[in-house]
């Protein structure tokens, strides 16, 4: 399973080439991204960058959208009930809609509403979490039309190439420290990466993991370590002064972003999350691809929205 992550440099290369064909330009003042699970995190990670419009990533169905909203809906499978419902809501409210998917019902909806939906078809690996490069690359290509700073998509691939070998070692080291503990990932600027670490360990290693946002955790959550320090493993992602405060008081493990480029840090740190979770899964003798509980949730959720 490790190879699913180690081939990300070629996957980014493929995605960057395909992104050149995307010609959608954002012309609204508000952009809302929606997705679930592995299809939510690319949109959340995109919040790390700065835009000259109001950009927010949410899970589920947006509450306040209108004709001055660009709705970007992502579902790798194309069958996620909440995301399908969000697109239907966007159609009803007259929003400008972009759908990023590989197949499924979303592709059919986009086909039926060609004049209202800009559809981007992507193809990656067997699981959404393995396919991160083909999901975030077209999203950032679209957001580059409203980005304050230039987005050089090549830096995504470069981040993987520059850090892949050392992160194989660091991922193994982190996974060893997690054994017997519940990891809690903290970050400020790179808070979405903390969410991704949690997701990867949940799905690949079938293990509990949590996250918290700095500086908010400094005002409440850190106090829980008075009783929880033997159970929890705090891990701080980032090297800002406010990150140092949390890391210092909790004596936390540190993950320092390797570059001055946010794009390189995004791709390399997400890679590290994946590698760490696979090493942990191997130690725990878990099959990263097998899902036992999530499919039951999806099945029950689909019944709700059909109703």
Image (cartoon, rainbow, N blue to C red):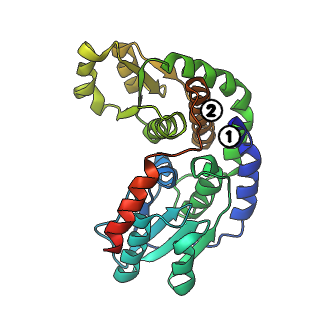
Question: Residue at horizontal 28%, vertical 22%?
Answer: 222
Question: Residue at horizontal 45%, vertical 42%?
Answer: 192
Crowd class of label 2 (few under 14; some 14 to 19; many from 20; radius 10 Å): many
Q: Which residue is mark 2?
A: 275
Estimate the x, y position of residue 207 in percent, counting from the top left.
Answer: 45, 31
Report how many numbered discs are placed on residues in the image.
2
Estimate the x, y position of residue 75 in percent, counting from the top left.
Answer: 52, 62
Q: Quadrant of residue 140?
A: bottom right
In the image, 160: left or right of 34? right
Separation of residues labelled 2 and 1 (CA atoms): 7 Å
Q: Secondary structure at mark 2?
A: helix
Crowd class of label 1 (few under 14; some 14 to 19; many from 20; radius 10 Å): many
- Give the answer, above or below, for where 173 lies relative to 47: above
Of 133 and 129, the residue lying toward us? 129
Question: Which comes sooner in the sequence, label 2 or label 1?
Answer: 1
- Residue 280, label in figure: none
Q: Secondary structure at mark 1?
A: helix
- Give the answer, above or below, for where 201 lies relative to 137: above
In the image, 242: left or right of 274? left
Residue 58 seen by the camera: no
Residue 200 seen by the camera: yes
Residue contact at pointers 2 and 1, CB within 8 angstroms: yes
**Looking at the rendering, in which quadrant would you find the C terminus?**
bottom left
**Looking at the rendering, in which quadrant would you find the N terminus?**
top right
Estimate the x, y position of residue 187 in percent, counting from the top left.
Answer: 42, 32
In the image, 207: left or right of 141? left
Estimate the x, y position of residue 274 in percent, counting from the top left.
Answer: 59, 36
In the image, 212: left or right of 235? left
Question: Residue at horizontal 38%, vertical 56%?
Answer: 59
Q: Which residue is mark 1?
A: 5
Of 183 and 163, the residue lying toward us? 183
């Amino acid at each position: 399973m490790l190879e699913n992550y180690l081939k990300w440099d070629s996957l980014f290369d493929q995605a960057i080439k395909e992104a050149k064909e995307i010609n959608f330009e954002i012309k609204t003042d508000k952009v809302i991204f929606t997705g679930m699970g592995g299809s939510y995190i690319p949109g959340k990670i995109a919040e790390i960058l700065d835009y000259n419009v109001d950009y927010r990533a949410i899970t589920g169905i947006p509450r306040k959208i209108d004709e001055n909203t660009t709705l970007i809906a992502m579902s790798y499978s194309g069958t996620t009930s909440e995301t399908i419902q969000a697109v239907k809501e966007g159609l009803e409210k007259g929003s400008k809609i972009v759908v990023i998917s590989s197949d499924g019902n979303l592709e059919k909806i986009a086909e039926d509403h060609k004049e209202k939906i800009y559809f981007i078809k992507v193809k990656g690996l067997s699981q959404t979490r393995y396919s991160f490069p083909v999901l975030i690359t077209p999203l950032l290509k679209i957001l580059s039309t409203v980005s304050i700073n230039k987005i050089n998509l090549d830096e995504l691939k470069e981040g993987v190439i520059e850090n892949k070998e050392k992160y194989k070692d660091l991922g193994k080291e982190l996974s060893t420290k997690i054994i017997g503990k519940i990891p809690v990932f903290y970050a400020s600027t790179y808070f979405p990466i903390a969410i991704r670490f949690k997701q990867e360990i949940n799905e690949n290693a079938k293990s509990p993991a949590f996250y918290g946002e700095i500086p908010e955790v400094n005002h409440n959550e850190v106090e829980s370590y008075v009783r929880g320090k033997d159970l929890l493993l705090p891990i701080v992602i980032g090297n800002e002064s406010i990150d140092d405060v949390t890391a210092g008081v909790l004596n936390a493990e540190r993950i320092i972003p390797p570059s001055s480029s946010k794009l390189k840090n995004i791709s390399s740190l997400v890679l590290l999350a994946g590698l760490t979770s696979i090493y942990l899964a191997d130690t725990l003798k878990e099959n990263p691809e097998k899902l036992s509980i999530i499919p039951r949730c999806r099945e029950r959720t689909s019944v709700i929205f059909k109703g």
